[in-house]
Image (cartoon, rainbow, N blue to C red):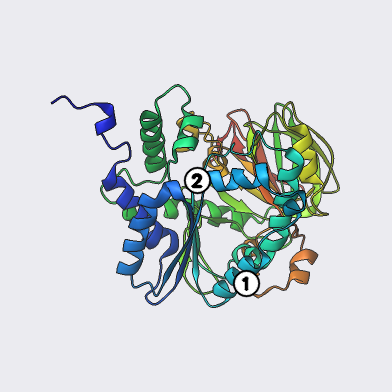
Amino acid sequence: MPTTRSDIAPVDPVKLDRLAEVAIKVGLQLQPGQDLFLTAPVAALPLVRRIAVHAYKAGAGLVTTQLSDEELTLARYRNAADASFDRAAGWLFEGMAKAFANNTARLAIVGDNPMLLAGEDAAKVSRASKAQSVAYQPALEKITGFDINWNIVAYPGPSWAKLVFPDDTEDAAVGKLADAIFAASRVDTADPVAAWAKHNAALQKRTAWLNGQRFAALHFTGPGTDLTVGLADNHEWQGGSSTAKNGITCNPNIPTEEVFTTPHARRVSGHVSSTKPLSYQGTLIDNIAVRFEEGRIVDAKASRGEQVLKKVLDTDDGARRLGEVALVPHSSPISKSGLLFFNTLFDENAACHIALGQCYSKCFLDGGSLTAEQIAAQGGNKSFIHIDWMIGSGKIDIDGVHADGRRVPVFRKGEWAS
């Protein structure tokens, strides 16, 4: 009997199992007896189940799973009372924060349609997002403070796959997105754990060089861009695997191609243009162009999604300032794929980027011992949001600027200068 496309599983089960193993052994390095809190869309259940298997094989104490569903999300926007959009389940996030305080590891699987809310009331989306951000803060602080080992991986949900590959059948689109995820996550090799060890070593070589330079600022130049990003006092570059405050070395993002640090929230000046669209809360924000004065965005435009961008910038006092600057070569595997994933986990690893909002305390020397006040004094930003958008391309040059004005080439035409 002939085999048809519908008879072939679009997601390779061997590579899916490798991704689950990498999430536990590389992403989290889950420890014997450690609990795990896992969130995922219902479409990702095949990966959730494999992760649970590998977690328990690694000695997990208890794996607790919270599932989300696109139809349940839309039911709220189409049927809930108006007051619903100013509320969030604070009790849930307080419980998450308590779990993290007790050394529970955190793993998130992304895979929903990034444009799910594109057709819903933008004001309601904005209100709900802000309420969620405020309520999530107790748990988020444990993550941005790197108190625990945490990790994000991806699964090719059908609606997301059709967004990336709109001209393919659903099965074909899922198969193509699965292959792209597996390649970017380095699980299309016989020994992905070894592949990650080699990749982490390469990223850490870059961070060691940058930390040895102790630049005061980075200067980005290119089409539509002339931006000076002052770096926070006593900043520290990170990349690849990193050690959390609980002593566990993990890879928070799979995939990752970036090295990153904390800008000085009050020392950013000039103008910059995005080089890739930003998918945010169901809106595609394209051709972003902003101007900074004394660290703050004073002018912002976009050819598409401008009103949503401006609402984001008005979230709180820190939303117009930077919390992260990251360097990614134009030749990264995700950039070479030529795909727009509509998902920051992937798209940020295709280009150099900056992030509006909250900084990572880990990106300071002895960051684990600093108070919030000390982080702020050294230039760290605080906000309810952390939103990355891409500013790199094959036409961007970056110079490192020392405190005495000396300049050192860091990137030339989108690639490391040395």
User: Judging from the image, what secondary structure is the residue with disc 2 in?
Assistant: loop
User: Judging from the image, what secondary structure is the residue with disc 1 in?
Assistant: helix
Disc 2 and disc 1: Cα gap in Å? Answer: 24 Å
* Amino acid type at image mark 2: Glu
CA neighbours of label 2 inside 10 A, class few (<14), some (14 to 19), many (20+) = many
Q: Is residue 374 left or right of residue 210?
A: right
User: Residue 122 sits in which quadrant?
Assistant: top right
Q: Is residue 54 left or right of residue 116?
A: left
Query: Which of disc 1 and disc 2 is earlier in sequence?
Result: 2
Nearer to me, 345 or 224: 345
* Number of numbered discs overlaid on the protein picture: 2
Q: Disc 2 marks which residue? A: 257
- Dot label at residue 25: none
Is 98 above or below relative to 393? below
Q: Quadrant of the N terminus?
A: top left
Q: Position of residue 243 (x, y in %)?
A: 51, 67
Q: Is residue 216 visible?
A: no
Q: Position of residue 299 (x, y in %)?
A: 85, 37
Q: Is residue 202 left or right of residue 82?
A: left
CB-based contact (under 8 Å), mark 2 and mark 1: no
Q: Position of residue 65 (x, y in %)?
A: 46, 62
Q: Position of residue 54 (x, y in %)?
A: 32, 62
User: Residue 52 sits in which quadrant?
Assistant: bottom left
Identify the residue shown where x is 75% and y is 57%.
383
Q: Disc 1 marks which residue? A: 368
Identify the residue shown where x is 60% and y is 40%.
352
Nearer to me, 398 or 241: 241
Identify the residue shown where x is 77% and y is 42%.
123
Is 195 above or below relative to 164? below
* Amino acid type at image mark 1: Gly
CA neighbours of label 1 inside 10 A, class few (<14), some (14 to 19), many (20+) = some
Q: Is residue 66 left or right of residue 392?
A: left
